[in-house]
């Protein structure tokens, strides 16, 4: 009897196909700009594509750590991720531009460059590797936290700093005599707590959400670099979607990125204030002369990577500061 009913249902179209599963994996907390962007994306898709697409969000490295995300995506184990721009070094040298120290004056300049022709062209540069860039997601400008106050570059000499897997960031710390240590994001708090490393670079929202400020007595407001992400999808998955579904998902991503960038701008101020209010980290403010020493020490990294990145791209980024 059950088989007969199932057959009738199939013939009459009453049994609908299972929704398309879209796994969105990321490595940060849900209250960060990226975490809130992912949640917002799921909400929009649930509203607009109910029954057609099911988005499952996995925050805090629950599914994959930041060292495995891209590999998992290329294997089809996850459909959407938003790694930091540093993670794409193995696929293209161009995106290393975002790791160059003291290249952008502020997030407004970053946004102008990303939305300009050079920035938009880089979104499609990964498709040959099985990835499609859908948009840039902001986190903010990076600060330096450490177990000792960092006023001038010599204060960092011999100190170990955790960095992402980026040759540019390694060179940045080499220039000031520090020791760059490439470690996964999920391990940073323990490394700081146990003094296995002396410091790290990150945005106010990550320093706050991951509680780095609880184990780092000093934070230098350096604004020396940018930490942004690229929302990417598996190209085979994306291109295989029905056109209407793909169009609706793209619109949801764009709206969610805009929302996430608004969150990033707000949390940059709120989380900085919360960290200072805690009294657990002391803010180190640089004078113009002190900041000038950091710029002079790190800026040679531009020339070191100019051949790989392209002088035209660096010039366009500099022009975005105007």
Image (tube, rainbow, N blue to C red):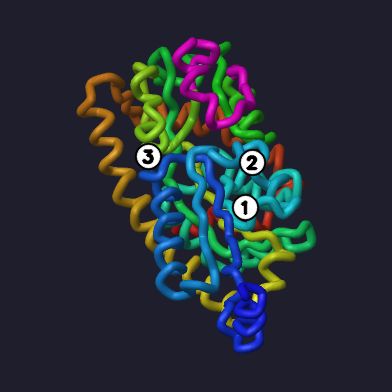
Circles 2, 3 touching at the beta carbon (< 8 Å): no
Mark 2 vs 1: CB contact within 8 A: yes
Distance Cα–Cα, label 2 vs label 3:
27 Å
Gap in Å between the C-alphas at discs 1 and 3? 27 Å
| Mark 3, secondary structure of its residue | helix
Residue 36 among magenta residues = no
Q: Is residue 124 above or below residue 314?
A: below
Q: Position of residue 136 (x, y in %)?
A: 53, 58
Q: Looking at the image, is 94 positioned above or below residue 227? A: below
Q: Callout 3: few (<14), some (14-19), or many (20+) C-alpha neighbours within 10 Å? A: many
**Label at residue 184:** none
Which quadrant does the C terminus fall into? bottom left
The answer to which of 201 and 292 lies nearer the viewer is 201
Q: Quadrant of residue 269?
A: top left
The crowd level at tag 2 (other Cα within 10 Å; few <14, some 14-19, many 20+) is many
Residue visible at 53% across and 30% down in the picture: 186
**Mark 3 lies on residue:** 205
Kind of element beneath mark 2: helix
The percent position of residue 234, horizontal first and vertical second, equals 68, 60
Q: Is residue 250 visible?
A: no
Q: Which residue is mark 2?
A: 302
Based on the picture, tell me whether residue 194 belongs to the magenta stretch.
yes
- Say which element carries label 1: helix
Answer with the quarter of the image where residue 41 lies.
bottom left
Residue 5 x/y as whole percent: 60, 79
Tag 1 and tag 3, C-beta contact below 8 Å: no
Q: Nearer the viewer, mark 1 or mark 3?
A: 3
Residue in view at x 72 percent, y 54 percent: 76
Rendered residue at 66%/74% (across/down): 3
Say which label, 2 or 3, has the lower sequence index: 3
Part of the protein shown in magenta: 177-199
Q: Pick whichever, 5 or 118, lies toward us.
A: 5
């Amino acid at each position: 009897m059950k088989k007969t009913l199932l057959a009738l249902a199939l013939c009459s179209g009453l049994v609908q196909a299972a929704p398309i599963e879209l796994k969105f994996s990321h490595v940060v907390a849900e209250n960060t700009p990226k975490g809130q962007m992912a949640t917002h994306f799921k909400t929009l898709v649930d509203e607009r594509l109910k029954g057609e697409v099911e988005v499952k969000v996995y925050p805090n490295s629950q599914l994959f750590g930041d060292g495995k995300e891209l590999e998992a995506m290329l294997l089809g184990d996850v459909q959407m991720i938003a790694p930091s721009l540093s993670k794409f070094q193995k696929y293209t040298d161009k995106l290393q531009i975002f790791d160059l120290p003291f290249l952008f004056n502020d997030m407004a300049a970053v946004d102008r460059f990303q939305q300009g022709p050079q920035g938009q062209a880089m979104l499609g540069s990964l498709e040959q590797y099985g990835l499609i860039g859908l948009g840039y997601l902001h986190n903010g400008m990076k600060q330096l936290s450490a177990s000792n106050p960092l006023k001038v570059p010599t204060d960092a000499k011999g100190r170990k700093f955790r960095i992402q897997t980026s040759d540019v960031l390694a060179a940045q710390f080499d220039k000031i005599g520090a020791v760059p240590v490439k470690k996964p994001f999920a391990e940073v708090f323990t490394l700081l707590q146990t003094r296995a490393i002396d410091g790290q670079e990150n945005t106010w929202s990550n320093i706050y959400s991951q509680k780095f400020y609880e184990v780092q007595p000093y934070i230098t407001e350096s604004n020396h670099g940018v930490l942004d992400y690229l929302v990417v999808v598996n190209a085979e998955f994306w291109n295989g979607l029905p056109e209407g579904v793909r169009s609706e998902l793209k619109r949801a991503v764009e709206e969610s990125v805009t929302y996430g960038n608004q969150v990033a701008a707000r949390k940059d101020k709120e989380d900085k204030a919360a960290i200072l209010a805690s009294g657990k980290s002391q803010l180190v403010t640089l004078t113009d002369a002190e900041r000038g020493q950091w710029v002079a020490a790190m800026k040679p990294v531009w020339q070191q990577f100019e051949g790989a990145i392209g002088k035209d791209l660096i010039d366009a980024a500099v022009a975005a500061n105007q």
